Amino acid sequence: MNLAARALSRRRALQWAGVAALAPHLGAVRAQAWPAKSVNIVVPFPPGGGTDAFARPLFAAMSKALGQQFVIDNKGGAGGTVGASLAAKAAADGHSAFMGAVHHSIAPSFYPKLDYTLDADFVPVGLVASVPQVIVVNPTKVAAKTLPELLEFIRKNPGRLNYGSAGNGTSHHMAGELFKLQTRTFITHIPYRGAGPALQDLIAGQVDMMFDGLGSSAAHIKAGRLRAIAVASEQRAPGFAEVPTSAEGGLPTYRVATWYGLWMPKATPREAVAAFQARLREALNSAELKAAWTGLGALTPNLWGDDFAKFVTAETRRWAEVVKASGAKLD
């Protein structure tokens, strides 16, 4: 090899060494650039429900902080499974996400022919909020002010009261069925296409009561449009210290939480998922969203990625047992 060839070979070796040295940082550079355009967030329920109540302040804050729009795309139907199916088929370019809820861990027990699974078709991002389920009644239709009073009326008048839900197989539905199972009572289930429409009819007096996620009922409770009977949790909810727990009302094992989480389509680049997680952590730790979550009675569990996926798997098993024990079916 002549001198010129040796010099060229050395220059190329140095160039490749430089590229190799930069390689570990390329992913970080790409992550820092995320989002490069607007991000579409599928919310699989109509506006006005619990998922919407958390999605809108969260993504408004992220839009403001990152200078790109996070667009809420409400796609309701079939207990949240229509939106989930659409989200599973979205472009995996790092700019599509799906904000699901506890309902999606119940759905496999109700809808055996789903064309997606959370494991196979999504990448778990993280859990963004968890709120206790709350038993709420229309105060003009139901005189009971406490859980013992409500149970006494239901037992003396089986079938007279009904309860609205966000749809078959949602946590609202199963919370009602679990309540009936544990108290050995009967109330009629009225399914809707989302918690928003169900709440509208509850406030209007078309249905008597709901087992709702506290996030979507919070404003109506504070305004006096709904009466909170009890929260289905071990401790009283943040921001709602006046509402007793189900245990205080005589049902120590009645515990139901509504949680909300985020996924991205399966083939989404890891850098984009990591960037989304990092930006979510920043938003959820902001004073603005901490105050908003307290106002909605919510906590922010620290579950991300694989830990979030394991949590969802455990929830899916748990709800399958409840569905089987209750005998609940599509209405």
Image: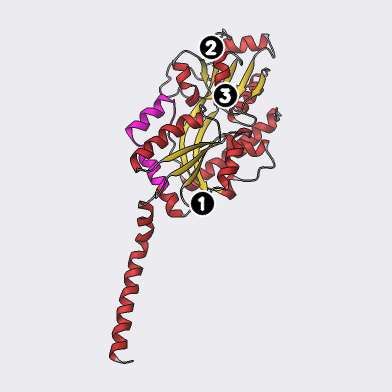
Q: Position of residue 322 (x, y in %)?
A: 65, 31
Among the two numbered marks 3 and 2 on one chain, the one whose residue lies closer to the N terminus: 2
The vertical placement of 155 against 309, above or below, is above
Element assignment for label 3: helix
Local packing at callout 1 (Cα closer than 10 Å; few below 14, some 14-19, many 20+) is some
Q: Quadrant of residue 223?
A: top left
Element assignment for label 2: loop
Going 43% across and 34% down the picture, which residue do you hit?
Answer: 300
Determine if the magenta segment contains residue 44.
no
First to last magenta residue range: 276-300
Secondary structure predominantly adopted by residues drawn in magenta: helix
The quadrant in which the N terminus is found is: bottom left
What's the residue type where badge 1 is placed?
Answer: Ala
What's the residue type where badge 3 is placed?
Answer: Pro
Q: Residue furthest bottom?
A: 2
Determine if the magenta segment contains residue 277.
yes
**Res 158 visible:** yes
Going 58% across and 13% down the picture, which residue do you hit?
Answer: 205
Pick the front one: 283 or 204: 204
Which label sits on residue 92? Answer: 1
The label nearer to you, 3 versus 2, is 3
Which residue was labeled with disc 3? 197
